[in-house]
Image (cartoon, rainbow, N blue to C red):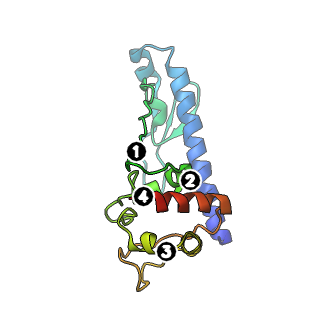
Amino acid sequence: MTMAQDKLKFGLVAIVVATLVSTLTACDSAKDESPAAAASTAQPAPPATSGEQMISIDDKGNIAPFGFASRKAVPVAELQVAAVATAVAGAATSVVFGTNCVACHGPDAKGVQGLGVSLVDSKLVADSSPADLIVFLKEGRAADSPDNVSGVPMPSFAWMAEADLAEVTAYLKSLK
């Protein structure tokens, strides 16, 4: 990563953190006020002219970009975690597959349209030895490779521990 990319990443992170802190501060100060009082204390800045950033200032002097200081706290329902079942009958499970592969190959390993091919019907998985699959996972495959059937690149997982690669390979070989 170049220094310019590092600076850009740092700047974006700083903006996100500042926005979150301002939002939380505004929400915290607004929760004890009635809706009418909260609406009357917000003092939005006049519309920005060329080159100026629009800001909002609450009654305590807190500045929030994008007008968040004038927003009221909104109750958010508690997240419900969906139960995950083994989607392929008779297949072993793999935490590593669930963490690293599901986004493109789906929870049932039958592929996600436009992202990853079905591994259940994959000739590569069926015809390769576990050692060959580990080599493939470490190397990945470019989108323009003649062997690429989807036109989507397969990332390299060379960073992954050997035990994790072996777990994914065993899982892939168990798919029917």
In the drawing, what numbered circle is on residue 96?
Answer: 2
At horizontal 44% and vertical 51% (from top left) the residue drawn is: 91
- Asked if residue 96 shows in the view, the reply is yes
Disc 4 on helix, strand or loop? Answer: loop
Q: Earlier in the sequence, mark 2 or mark 4?
A: 2
At horizontal 56% and vertical 75% (from top left) the residue drawn is: 132
Image vertical order of residue 3 relative to residue 96, above or below: below
Q: Nearer the viewer, residue 47 or 135?
A: 135
Q: Earlier in the sequence, mark 1 or mark 3?
A: 1
Residue type at numbered disc 4? Leu
Q: Circle 1 is placed at which residue position?
A: 47
Residue type at numbered disc 3? Ser
Asked if disc 1 and disc 2 are in contact, CB closer than 8 Å, the reply is no
- Asked if residue 161 shows in the view, the reply is no
Q: Earlier in the sequence, mark 2 or mark 3?
A: 2
Disc 1 on helix, strand or loop? Answer: loop
Q: Circle 4 is placed at which residue position?
A: 175
Residue type at numbered disc 2? Val
Occupied quadrant, residue 111: bottom left
Q: Earlier in the sequence, mark 1 or mark 2?
A: 1
Q: Circle 3 is placed at which residue position?
A: 128
Residue 58: x %, y % from top left: 52, 28
Disc 4 packing (10 Å; few <14; some 14–19; many ≥20) = many
Judge from the rendering whether residue 162 lies leftward or rightward of residue 92; answer left or right.
Answer: right
